Image (cartoon, rainbow, N blue to C red):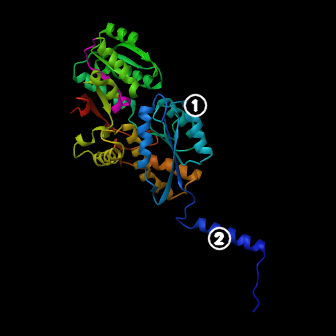
């Protein structure tokens, strides 16, 4: 019997058909899931960016049976660099998801790239975006309004009537001043002075003197990272005796280290992970908060935990819920998969993480409620839960 030999063209067609058949088999992987993490590992916001970068080492290697390809890049605390890095991750690396940044301006920049390219974006800063501009952006940190309400409620319960404000002269300061002025009147509080400063400033003496002249019952510092310690220290050095509140952007060990005795008694809203051991047994986030703290501090040292690192950990918890859902209808590396991820983010409910329980919807891309915050007080150089 004579063996029939196929032509080279026929063999090529068979090879292509076989490859197509393999891709059509359910469960056949098209590509790894590519996650781009953009953080300020250097620059003015590095104190809160480094924990986020460090947490990348704890990111899962696979989710839903698909390998995770995690790419970590530095935005250098610069929104322009964040834009460049986000575009490179999308166009050159075909990122399925963007994470970042912890710096407000940089996170807004990444959101713009995500929107232009229809890529899901899990922001590590609680950025506000104009209506219709956050279709692809979901926040992991607590909404500023949620945290401002917690601060104002504490002020009201402690007989504060007048407030002085000093905050960054950028979007972060804007968010806090806006919510403070919006929410304070209904609580019977009045903002009697407002001052601003730049993240890189080395002195705020002039602003502090103006605040002292207004004689507020309490002062709120609308800053983040180590830079927020400067007005706190200056006010104490100038003799201010009233309570000083900070934002959740200041909840870092470096804030306590730099502020020293001057920041004793500071009151701050925070994600629950910072006091994981102090959370009640009934708190749904306690197990994941303890798991993160245990793993992170085993790798980076005692009391090295940071809520900005925990946001990256929580991004993984969220992806563990939504990736398997998205994989039912599309494969990684495709626009269909990215759309399916976004849809799953809006539909999955009660997603428990270390910093709260997420319930994103089409109209709410913050997703956290009262379970997503606690109040902390600096006492004896450490964080204590205000009960």
Q: Which residue appears at 76% of the width and 78% of the height?
A: 6
For mark 2, give the secondary structure.
helix
**Image position, residue 212 (x, y; %):** 32, 9
Q: Which residue appears at 69% of the width and 70% of the height?
A: 15
Mark in front: 1 vs 2: 1
Quarter of the view holding residue 29: bottom right
**Image position, residue 313 (x, y; %):** 40, 45
**Mark on residue 18?**
2
Q: Earlier in the sequence, mark 1 or mark 2?
A: 2
Q: Is residue 242 a member of the stretch shown in magenta?
A: yes
For mark 1, give the secondary structure.
helix
The magenta region covers 239-254
Say above or below: 239 vs 114.
above
Quarter of the view holding residue 172: top left
Q: Which residue appears at 38% of the width and 23% of the height?
A: 228
**Image position, residue 263 (x, y; %):** 29, 23
Disc 1: which residue: 80
**Image position, residue 230 (x, y; %):** 37, 20
**Horizontal placement of 213 versus 36: left or right?**
left
Disc 2 residue crowd, few under 14, some 14–19, many 20+, Cα 10 Å: few
**Horizontal placement of 47 versus 81: left or right?**
left
Q: Does residue 180 show up?
A: no
Quadrant of the drawing holding the C terminus: top left
Q: Does residue 274 show up?
A: yes
């Amino acid at each position: 019997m004579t063996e029939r030999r196929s032509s080279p063209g026929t063999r090529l067609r068979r090879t292509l058909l076989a490859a197509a058949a393999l891709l059509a088999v359910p469960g056949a992987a098209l590509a790894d899931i590519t996650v781009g993490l953009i953080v300020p590992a250097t620059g003015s916001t590095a104190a809160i960016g480094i924990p986020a970068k460090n947490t990348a080492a704890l990111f899962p290697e696979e989710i839903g049976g698909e390998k995770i390809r995690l790419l970590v890049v530095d935005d250098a605390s610069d929104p322009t660099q964040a834009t460049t890095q986000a575009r490179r991750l999308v166009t050159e690396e075909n990122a399925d998801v963007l994470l970042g940044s912890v710096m407000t301006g940089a996170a807004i920049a990444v959101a713009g790239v995500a929107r232009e390219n229809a890529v899901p974006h899990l922001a590590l800063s609680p950025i506000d975006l104009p209506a219709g501009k956050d279709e692809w952006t979901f926040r992991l940190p607590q909404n500023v309004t949620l945290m401002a309400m917690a601060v104002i409620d504490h002020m009201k319960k402690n007989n504060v009537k007048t407030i002085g404000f000093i905050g960054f002269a950028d979007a972060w300061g804007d968010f806090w001043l806006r919510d403070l002025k919006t929410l304070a009147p209904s609580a019977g509080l009045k903002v009697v002075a407002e001052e601003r400063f730049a993240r890189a400033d080395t002195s705020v003496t002039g602003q502090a003197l103006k605040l002292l002249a207004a004689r507020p019952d309490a002062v709120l510092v609308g800053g983040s990272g180590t830079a927020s310690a400067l007005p706190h220290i200056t006010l104490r050095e100038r003799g201010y005796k009233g309570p000083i509140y900070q934002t959740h952007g200041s909840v870092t060990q470096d804030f306590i280290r730099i502020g020293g005795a001057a920041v004793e008694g500071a009151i701050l809203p925070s994600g629950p992970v910072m006091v994981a051991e102090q959370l009640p047994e009934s708190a749904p986030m306690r197990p994941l908060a303890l798991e993160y703290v245990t793993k992170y501090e085993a790798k980076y040292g005692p009391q090295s935990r940071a809520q900005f690192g925990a946001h990256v950990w929580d991004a993984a918890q969220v992806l563990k819920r939504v990736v398997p859902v998205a994989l039912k209808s599309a494969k990684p590396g495709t626009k269909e998969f990215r759309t399916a991820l976004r849809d799953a983010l809006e539909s999955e409910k009660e997603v428990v993480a270390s910093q709260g329980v997420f319930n994103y919807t089409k109209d709410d891309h913050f997703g956290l409620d009262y379970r997503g915050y606690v109040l902390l007080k600096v006492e004896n150089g450490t964080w204590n839960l205000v009960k």
